[in-house]
Amino acid sequence: MNELDLLNVVRPAPPPAPEAEARGRTRLHRAIAGETTHDARPAMARAHRNRGWWRLGLGAALAGGLAAAVAVVAVVTLTPAGQSTPRDTRAVTATPADLLRNASLVAAVDDLTARDHQFVHVSYVRTATVSDGGSMRPLPPGDGPSASQSTANFVSWLVDSRQEMWESANGSGDGLLRLSYSAPRPLPGQNLPPAARQEPDMEFRIAACDPDMRAPSYTYLRGLPTEPKQLRALVDKEVRATSTPEDFADPVRRGETTWEMLTGLAHAPAAPAKLRAAVYALMAEQTDVRVVPEATDAAGRVGVAVARELPTYGTRMELVFDRTTYRYLGSRTVTVAANPRMGYPAGMVIESDALLKTEVVDELPPAGPHAQSADCGDNRPKGE
Amino acid sequence: MILPTESRTHSIENRDVEDADLLRRSRTDPESFADLYDRYFGELHRYAARRVVGPAGDDLAAEVFLVAFSQRSRFDPARGSVRAWLYGIATNLIQRHRRTEVRGYRALARMSAEPPSGAGEERLIARVAASAVRGRLAAALGRLNARDRHALLLVAWAELSQAEAAAALGVPVGTVASRLHRARRQLREVLGDVDPTQEIFLHEGVS
């Protein structure tokens, strides 16, 4: 051992934190985007600057086995020429693709591995609108959420809950779900309707059911392909299987169902990191995906969201990420137009959740004396 | 120094050619520059974080790529590899943080006087610290002439060859060799007549 070797113990060389790497990449992408817009393609930049829309071809190989070349439509906030941007040491998100790529890098660090006979335990808080009343008659054709109606058919309020769920890692046994509810709250700017009621706390033994893409189990998630091309084919197949032929042929409806399917997968807390990376890659290639710079999850954490509008429902579905660490925080559904029938104003968060903890445990906690049993529902056979 | 084996040399050459191609491509297709980030951020970050401790080290590694991107038209493959060029940019940025860097070595030298708290796999490091070798080396690093320190640490920490270090610093190989020689001599002086290897194993045996 000589003095050069000894130098290596003077100060250790820790690997970079994923968020440091992600922040650096975002800064570089921003510089690349700035040059592409201002110098290399000035005519295009001028044409698109007013709308704030800009087509970015991300030729760079994406990390973690993502698609090698993905063309995405991205919203970027362009700095007007001549205006200097203050140097921002916090995360600066240029495009949904950048944000999703950073998130997939960070997800790899938190990857869970559960052995057979262990349980995946997930805690989250959720805020949802609960509605009562209203007529059961279907809306007349063409009556969408933005159609004007003078009276609200439903009364709605908000309910906060804390949810704890334990799921068998190999689907071999029942799981457990504990729900505890807070007092109901009125919608923003409204009074609490008399029909609003406090929900009792509940506990369910949950049967291990045959999973599908919209109700994925840990085993199911582990079995999905993590190569984006293969996953895309599988998602398309599921979208076809759950759509009417008319909806499947309609690009708007098909795009909506695909986004719902992908957010469902991204929303599954125990999704393996490689699958999550593939899901994020597919999300980045969807049309009309945008970044919402400020989105608060159900736990009150302010993050940045990747979102897509679902015009048929008059809502926007968002995945919220931490602004500096890119960790997945939760999801939200926000109205993009007022929905008089439901009594929702525009821009209202009608559903949000926040993932608090995901861990692997050896045992299921004992169910209380009042635990109910939840079976799989009409369409979901019990799996074995 | 360990000499590269033939196959290692070959793969390094391949890598350098690929990097230079990537850089050339990035002049017309700026997005392909991100591939260089993916290849080198990790090692440049490790190097920067060892030289400038704290958030400034994180920022520094990211800044290397911003500077490199903006100056990519000026890269000349005849003067060295892309990797060496990136370390050269890092060196210039570190130079701006020289005071912070030297303060860090002094703090480390003081800390090494304290009993080490490391255990387990850090045993060897803890032993070195206990023997105060680490502290002495850290203090010596802080006292080195900045140019000698750049040459020394590009070789010892970044594992650049002397030729690569010369390309990074923009000086002849002979200059790197003499800076390296001077730096190593100064380090050996602070280690005194103690054989550090001997001392480490002595302490290993005692516990």
Image (cartoon, rainbow, N blue to C red):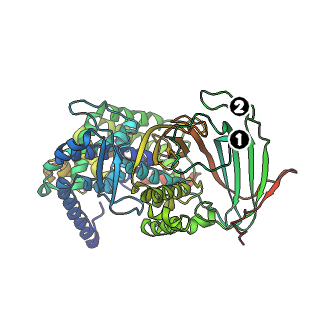
Which residue appears at 20% of the width and 30% of the height?
Answer: A82
Chain name for mark 1: A
Label 2 residue SS: loop
Which residue appears at 67% of the width and 27% of the height?
Answer: A191
Q: Residue tagged by mark 1?
A: A132
- Disc on the earlier residue, 2 or 1: 1
Is disc 1 surrounded by few (<14), some (14 to 19) or many (20+) residues within 10 Å? some
Left-right relation of A102 to A61: right
Residue A87, placed above or below residue B82: above
Indicate the quadrant where residue B160 lies: bottom left
In contact (CB < 8 Å): disc 2 and disc 1: yes
The type of residue carrying mark 2 is Pro
The type of residue carrying mark 1 is Asp
Left-right relation of A55 to A281: left
Would residue A271 be seen by someone viewing this image from the given angle? yes
Percent position of residue A74, x then y: 35, 48
Chain name for mark 2: A
Of residues B56 and B95, the one drawn nearer to the viewer in this rendering: B56
Percent position of residue A127, x then y: 64, 40
Residue A185, placed above or below residue B36: above
Indicate the quadrant where residue A198 lies: top right
Same-chain status of marks 2 and 1: yes
Residue B36, placed above or below residue A163: below
Indicate the quadrant where residue A24 lies: top left
Which residue appears at 76% of the width and 62% of the height?
Answer: A375
Left-right relation of A92 to B128: left
Q: Residue tagged by mark 2?
A: A193
